[in-house]
Amino acid sequence: MNQLCNILRATFIVPFSAGLIKERRNGGFSIHDGSIAGIVLLTTAMIIIFETIVVLPVYQSRLLMIGLAGLALICLVMCSVAARCRSNWVEIKTVKPSDKMKLKFLWLFCIGNIIYQALQLAMHLVCKVYDLQVTLFWAFTWAFQICQTVFIHYFSRFEFANVLCLYYGLLVLFVTNISMWSQQTFYTYRINHDINISNLINTTVSNCLYVDGLSEAVEYLTPYLQPVLLEYSLLSLIFLSEMWPKKKVEFERLNIFLSTDADDENQTLLIQNDDMESEQHPLLPRCSVWHKNSVRVLVIGLLYNFSFLLLQCIYIYGPREQMTDYRTYSNILFFCANFVRTPLIIKCFYAMNGQLWPKQETNSGMSLDQFVIITSSFATCGYYISDCFRVVYPNSKPLEVLFRINAVLRIFATLFQTLFILQMKHYKKIGNQKPFCSVQNTFLFVSLVNLGIWMSYTFVNPRYRLIQSSFVLESFWFPFVIFYHFECFVAFYKFFRA
C-alpha cells in the first residue's frame, strides 16, 4: 500500500511541486516550493493559450477565455478564503507610498476598461449582432477584473507564505491577465474589419435607433481606452509578483528578528528626536522627503507638465485644419522634453560618485517589475526606431533633420532611463538631500517629466492617432510605450520617497 502511495505521489504531486527544497527528509519525499514547476507550467500554458487564440475562430476563443476567467474567479475566492482562515499563510509587509499611488491607478485602469467594454457591448446588443456568448464573455471579464482589483487592493499589504495552493492560484491569475490582453489585441482588428460600425448602421436600421451616439462614443474613445487593458494587466502582474509566495524560512527569520528590528527603529526615532533642533547628520535617516526645495521642484514640474500639455491641446483640439500642424509642433515639444530628460538622467548617473552609494547587501535576482520595465523599454525603442525609417517631412529639410534627431534622442533617453532604474536596485541615497539640485529632487522632476509624457500619450495623442491609424503600431506597440512611461514615473517617484 505504501508503495502504491509513493507511486501515485511521484506521478501526480512531485512533478507539480518541483523547485527549491523547503523541507528536507531523508526517509521519504522532501517537500519543494514549486518554483521550477510553476515557471515551466506558466510558460507552457501561455504558449498553448496563445496558439489557441491564433488558430481558433473568435467565437471559440471567447469560450476559452470565459472558462479561464471562471477558473480565475474560483482561484480568487479560494485564495482569499484560505488566506483569511490561515493567518500563518500571510505576512504583513511595509506598504510604500508608491504602492498606494499604484493602487489608485489600478482602480482607474479597471474603471476605464469596464467603461470601454460596456460601450462596445451596448452598441452590439442594441443592434442584436452578438449572441449570449458575447454577453457572458464581457460579464466574466468584468467580474474577474473587479474581483481581482479588490483582491489586490486588500492583499497587496501582505506577502503570501509558500503554499502550493496559493502558488498555483496566483499562476492562474498570471495566465488570465496575459491571455485576456492577447485575445483582445489579436481580434481588435479582425472584429473591426468583419463587423464595423458603418455596416451595423446600414444593415440594421430598425434595431439601431440609438447606435449613432454609441458608435460615435466607441469610435472616439477607442484610441484613449484601448491601451488601458494592457496597462491594467501589466500593473496587476506587478502587484501579484510582489505578493508572490516566499520561502517559509524567510518568515521564520522575520519573526525571530522582529523584536530586534523594533528596538532598532525605536533607537532611530530617539536619535532623530534628540537631533531635531540641531543640524541632521548626513547618514541618519530622514523623517520626510518633503521640504521647501522639493515643493519648489514639484511646482516647477507641474507647471512644466501643464504648459507641455496645453501647447499640444491648442492644436489637437483646435480647428480641424490645425490637425496637419500638430505633428510638427508635437515633434518640437517632444524634442524639448527629451532634451530636458536626458541631461537629468545623466545627472542621476553622476550622483553615483557622491549622493548615491552601493548597498551593503544586494539581491542579484530580477523582479517582475524590472522585467516589465525591460520588456516595455524594448517595445518603446522598437516603436521609436520604426519612426526613423519614415519620411515625415519630404518638403522641409530642417524639420526632417529635427525629427531624426528627436528619434535618436528619445531612444538614448529611453535606454539611459531603463539602465538607471535597473542600476538603482544596488544603490541608496546618502548625505544631505535638501539642496535644490540634489539627486532626490532630480528624481522628483524626472518622475514628473515621465508623468507628462504619459498623460500626453494617454489623453492628447489619441485624438491625432484617431485619423493616423496603424494597427500593428497603435494596437500592439503603442500600449507598451504608454505603460513604459507610467512605470518610469512610478519608479523615480519611488526613488524620491525612498
Image (cartoon, rainbow, N blue to C red):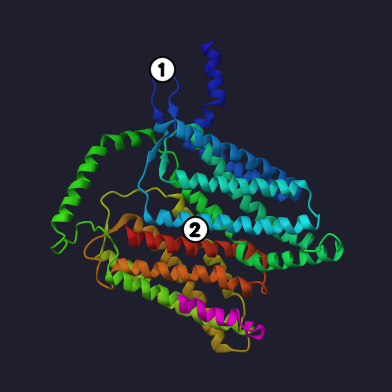
Q: Determine if residue 338 is in view.
A: no
Callout 2: SS: helix
Q: Quadrant of the N terminus?
A: top right
- Residue at image x 37%, y 76%? 300
In the image, residue 489 above or below residue 389: above
| Percent of width and height locating residue 134 | 73, 49
Nearer mark to the viewer, of 2 and 1: 2
Taking the magenta stretch, the answer to whether it contains residue 316 is yes
Instruction: Say whether disc 2 or disc 1 marks the residue closer to the N-terminus.
Output: 1
- What is the quadrant of the C terminus in the image? bottom left
Q: Quadrant of residue 257?
A: top left
Amino acid carrying label 2: it is Phe
Number of residue marks: 2
For disc 1, the marked residue is 27
Mark 1 neighbour density, 10 Å: few (under 14) some (14–19) many (20 or more): few
Which of these two is toward me, 169 or 403?
169
Give the main secondary structure, helix, strand or loop, of the magenta stretch.
helix
Per the model, the C-alpha gap separating discs 2 and 1 is 51 Å
User: Which residue has dot 2 on it?
Assistant: 105
Residue 186 versus residue 345 in the image, above or below: above
Amino acid on which disc 1 is placed: Gly
> Residue 287: x, y in percent?
25, 57
Query: Which residue range is magenta in the image?
Result: 306-323
In the picture shown, does residue 8 fall above or below 452? above
Residue at (62%, 53%) from the top-left corner? 181
- Specify whether residue 374 is in view: yes
Q: From the viewer's perspective, is 38 left or right of 179?
A: left
